[in-house]
Image (cartoon, rainbow, N blue to C red):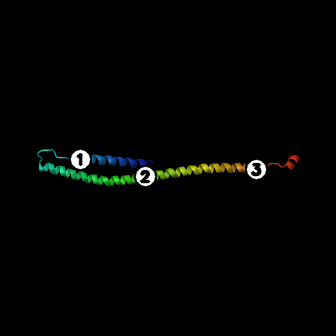
Amino acid sequence: MGEAANAEGKVVQLESNAARLVALRTSLSVAAGLTSGAALGNAGELGLRLDTVRDGLTHALDAARATALAKAEMRRDADIARESAERLQVRAVAELQQMIEQRMMAGIRHRTRKEVDRG
């Protein structure tokens, strides 16, 4: 179960990082007024780098989501198997108790009228 929680945590962390990258990219704007070519170039380059990182993060986020989904499915399947095993155990105990009772009852022989008269 810990693996599924860790995978979900990684997804949340990556989503948070992606949101921060979007916020950084959005905040890159050139101030109104005169701007040098170097400032525009730096802002453009930084924007491209942020876009590249965001694209890579998107792939990592997709992979993390797929892993988290697989871990959650594994956890669900394990829970189903555990519950089935518990039900089987309860049924086996009930059948064992019934068998013991039947054997005990078979060992108790009711005496016939003739045996009572002789006895």
Tell me the distance, in whole angstroms, between the alpha carbons under discs 3 and 1.
86 Å
Q: What is the three-letter code of the residue carrying label 1?
A: Thr
Which residue corresponds to mark 1?
Answer: 26
Secondary structure found at label 1: helix
The residue where tag 2 is placed is 71
Density class for disc 2 (Cα within 10 Å; few <14, some 14-19, many ≥20) is many
How many numbered marks have been drawn onto this rendered protein structure? 3
Q: Is residue 119 visible?
A: no
Where's residue 46, x and y in %? 20, 50
Q: Which residue is mark 3?
A: 107
The residue that appears at 66% across and 48% down in the rendered structure is 97
Question: In this image, 115 relative to 45: left or right?
Answer: right
Badge 3 amino acid: Gly
Residue at coordinates 25% horizontally, 54% vertically from top-left? 52
Residue 94: image x %, image y %?
A: 64, 49
- Picture coordinates of residue 51 (x, y %)? 25, 52
Q: Earlier in the sequence, mark 2 or mark 1?
A: 1
As measured in the structure, the alpha-carbon distance from the residue carrying label 3 to the one carrying label 2 is: 54 Å
Q: Is residue 81 visible?
A: yes
Tell me the tag on residue 75.
none
Percent x, y of residue 10: 36, 48
Q: Residue at x 36, y 52 (%)?
A: 64
What residue occupies the far top of the structure in this picture? 32
Mark 2 → mark 1, Cα distance in angstroms: 34 Å
**Along the horizontal axis of the image, is 20 left or right of 64?**
left
Amino acid identity at mark 2: Lys
The mark that comes first in sequence, 3 or 1, is 1
